[in-house]
Image: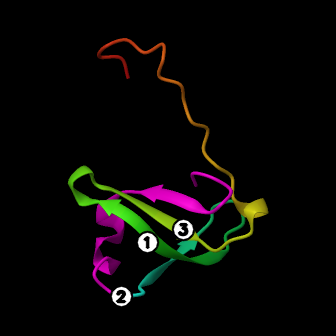
């Protein structure tokens, strides 16, 4: 979960089978409440194996991941 607006970030290969189906959706089960919600594809970059979905879930159920800060990273550091 990227934000409380319902954006999800995943690998493209996970949702590749729905990309070419007009109006296609998928079900996402949230770990924190074990409920399933409908999501639609917002955008994808197959070459970088990334995709963004939008889930129709209450914002109170969406717990965004903490986003790190890369300003102090050194070359080669993970």
Q: Looking at the rendering, which quadrant does residue 50 occupy?
A: bottom left
Q: Mark 3 points at which residue?
A: 54
Q: Looking at the rendering, which quadrant does residue 55 occupy?
A: bottom right
Q: In which quarter of the image is the N terminus?
A: bottom right
Place of residue 56 in the rendered image (x, y in percent of width and height, measured from the top left): 63, 74
Q: Which residue is drawn at 48% across and 17% down?
A: 71
Question: Is 55 left, or right, of 9 in this rendering?
Answer: right
Which comes sooner in the sequence, label 1 or label 3?
1
Q: Residue at x 52, y 59 (%)?
A: 8
Which comes sooner in the sequence, label 2 or label 3?
2
Magenta region: 1-22
53 is higher (above) or lower (below) than 67:
below
- Which is nearer the eye, 35 or 43? 43
* Label 2, label 3: how far apart the Cα atoms are: 16 Å
Place of residue 62 in the rendered image (x, y in percent of width and height, measured from the top left): 69, 59
Q: Residues within 10 Å of mark 3 (few under 14, many from 20)?
A: many
Figure colour scheme: rainbow
Q: Name the residue under label 1.
A: 41
Asked if marks 1 and 3 touch (Cβ < 8 Å), the reply is: no
Q: Looking at the rendering, which quadrant does residue 16 occupy?
A: bottom left
| Secondary structure of residue under mark 2 | loop
Which comes sooner in the sequence, label 1 or label 2?
2
Q: Residue at x 48, y 75 (%)?
A: 40
* Label 1, label 2: how far apart the Cα atoms are: 10 Å
Q: Residue at x 34, y 79 (%)?
A: 18
Disc number placed over residue 22 in the picture, else none:
2
> Count of labels shown?
3
């Amino acid at each position: 979960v990227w934000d409380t607006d319902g954006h999800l970030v995943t690998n493209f290969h996970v949702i590749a089978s729905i990309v070419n189906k007009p109006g296609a959706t998928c079900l996402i089960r949230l770990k924190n409440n074990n409920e399933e919600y409908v999501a639609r594809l917002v955008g994808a970059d197959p070459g970088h194996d990334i995709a963004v979905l939008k889930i129709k879930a209450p914002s109170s159920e969406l717990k965004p991941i903490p986003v790190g800060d890369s300003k102090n990273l050194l070359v080669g550091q993970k």
